[in-house]
Amino acid sequence: MSSSNPESSDPKALSDPSTRDHNPVDPDPDRPDGHSSNSGGEEEEEGECGFCLFMKAGGCKESFVAWENCVDEAEKNDDDIAAKCMEVTAALRRCMEDHADYYEPILRAEKAAHEEAIRELEKEKAATEESEQNLESKKELEKN
């Protein structure tokens, strides 16, 4: 959650509940029954987030629903989401890559977030190394 694409093995990229539980879609005000006009005749959860609606509207609906169910179950049982949902996350990722024409905005955002995380880790590593070198230099000066 291993392939040639490093972020495809990271279930946390997709398993962050904050990315799927925010941004609820308001019902269409023109519909007296209060149902969203973009449901395509299918039932949807009340207040379902825009991200979920987007994911389900593409070719990976089944993979997304399996991933979503896994994350919900892991949260309910206080399980490690990354470990528990590694396989369904990898399957969802492969599906999204197979349907990149539709999911490209999500794939692009995930790639940018992954690259930013790498930059931040490199900055932290460089700062730690510099701090260790400064400490060693200080110890050397104190010896003399």
Image: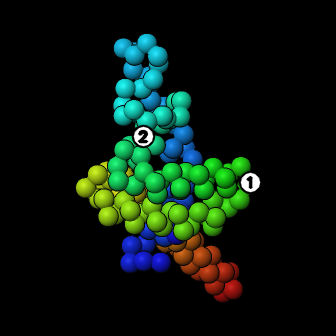
Residue 77 image position (x, y, % from top left): 74, 54
**Looking at this rendering, what residue extends furthest in the left direction?**
101
**Residue type, mark 1 in image:** Asn
Asked whether the beta carbons under mark 2 and mark 1 sit within 8 Å of each other, the answer is no
**Quadrant hosting residue 78:** bottom right
Across and down, in percent, residue 137 comes to: 59, 80
Q: Amino acid at mark 2?
A: Leu
- The one nearer the camera, 109 or 82, is 82
Reply above or below: 77 against 1: above
Pointer 2 local density, CA inside 10 Å: few below 14, some 14–19, many at least 20:
some
Residue 88 location (% of width, % of height): 53, 63
Determine the secondary structure under disc 2: helix
Q: Residue furthest bottom?
A: 144
The disc placed on residue 69 is none
Q: Is residue 57 visible?
A: yes
For the point 54% across and 30% down, the residue is: 46
Q: Which residue is mark 2?
A: 53
Picture layout, residue 89 above or below residue 62: below
